[in-house]
Image (cartoon, helix red, strand yellow):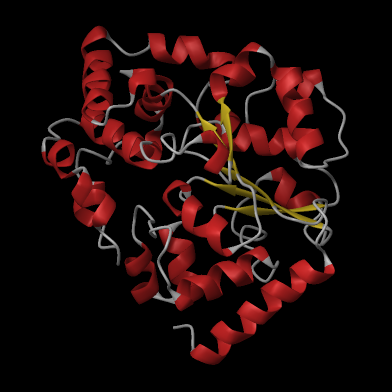
Amino acid sequence: MIYPAKIAYYRVLYHLHHLLLHQNTSSPVIISGTTRGGTTWLMEQLYHKDMQVIWEPTKYETITRHCGETFAKALGVIPYIPENAVWDEAFAYFGQLLSGGIAEGINSTSHPLLLSNPFAKNRLLMKCCYINLLLPWLCRNFNIRPILLVRSPFAVIASQLRHPGFREIGTTHNLFALNQSKYQDIFLRYEAPIKAIRTQTEMLANWWAIQHVELLRYPEEERKWEVVYYEDLFEDTEVWINRLYDKYSISNQFDKHRSERPSSTSYFFIADSFKSEVSDRNQLNPGLISEVRNVMSQYNISRYS
């Protein structure tokens, strides 16, 4: 449980942090996206030796460990907070996180970047696969501009179906039935396609869709996050990575060899690579492609329907 005094403390701490370190070079670099969506690969391209990597701080298990199961359940298996919500307990957790108060990942995974410089304090590099539905609320409450990495649902789902970690999702585990989040309005808005789920592919497609549908509809001039399409990175990697270096004031030089390597998580689990955008989609048979397209149509996501 996070107590009121702690909430007040981290509210003050966060604002002091940004008063003292207000330049773009000190603000966190946050990469948001879906699982199997390229976030690890992008993190590895943006990493600089003076950065401290924060690995998946919004996973259900992580939230439970830091804040207790009551708060974890309220945040949800598919974390969501409406943009205008006032939730002090959530503000306390994310204020602590964005101020460098939670070094999640340093001892919980063997990712080489977490071990390379665990005590770097100059800047945070945060990789998150579970904060898409938190972005409007986070950007409203904190001075951040996350990167939203969007990868085609066909490629994401093809990669998920090959990955051993996703075998139970949509078969024995219904993510939407498990979700008991404090705020349910977005799930109620898309209740019809969610209730129509019959297959594992439809489950994964709904999971992708619910995490993107409203973010991609924001007018570009109102977005407080940077949208980057995986397909664009695939087509012109050097231009896009250098653009992100400039935009986020990261003093790196583009490394072609590093960019052509698959992410470390792909090395660990399956034969996958950054350059697999087309081949991933081709691994879905026509029936599965049709299932994904139908779900995208129900959410009116025209880019992929």
Please tell me whether residue 198 is drawn above or below residue 103 in the rendered image.
Answer: above
- For image coordinates 24% across by 35% down, the residue present is 203
Q: Nearer the viewer, residue 136 or 159?
A: 136
Q: Position of residue 287 (x, y in %)?
A: 21, 12
Please tell me whether residue 188 is drawn above or below residue 38 in the rendered image.
Answer: below
As drawn, the residue found furthest toward the bottom would be 5
Q: Position of residue 210 (x, y in %)?
A: 32, 40
Q: Nearer the viewer, residue 220 or 99?
A: 220
Q: Nearer the viewer, residue 41 or 82?
A: 82
Q: Position of residue 101 (x, y in %)?
A: 67, 71
Of the 4 image quadrants, the one containing the N terminus is: bottom left
Please tell me whether residue 210 is drawn above or below residue 131 in the rendered image.
Answer: above
Q: Position of residue 48 (x, y in %)?
A: 82, 43
> Does the rendering let one see residue 4?
yes
Q: How many marks?
A: 0
From the viewer's perspective, is 91 left or right of 162?
right
- For image coordinates 56% across by 64% down, the residue present is 141
Of the 4 image quadrants, the one containing the C terminus is: top left
> Does the rendering let one see residue 57?
no
Please tell me whether residue 282 is drawn above or below residue 295 in the rendered image.
Answer: above
From the viewer's perspective, is 290 left or right of 100?
left
From the viewer's perspective, is 12 left or right of 7?
right
- The image quadrant that residue 241 belongs to is top right
- The image quadrant that residue 160 belongs to is top left
- For image coordinates 47% across by 71% down, the residue present is 90
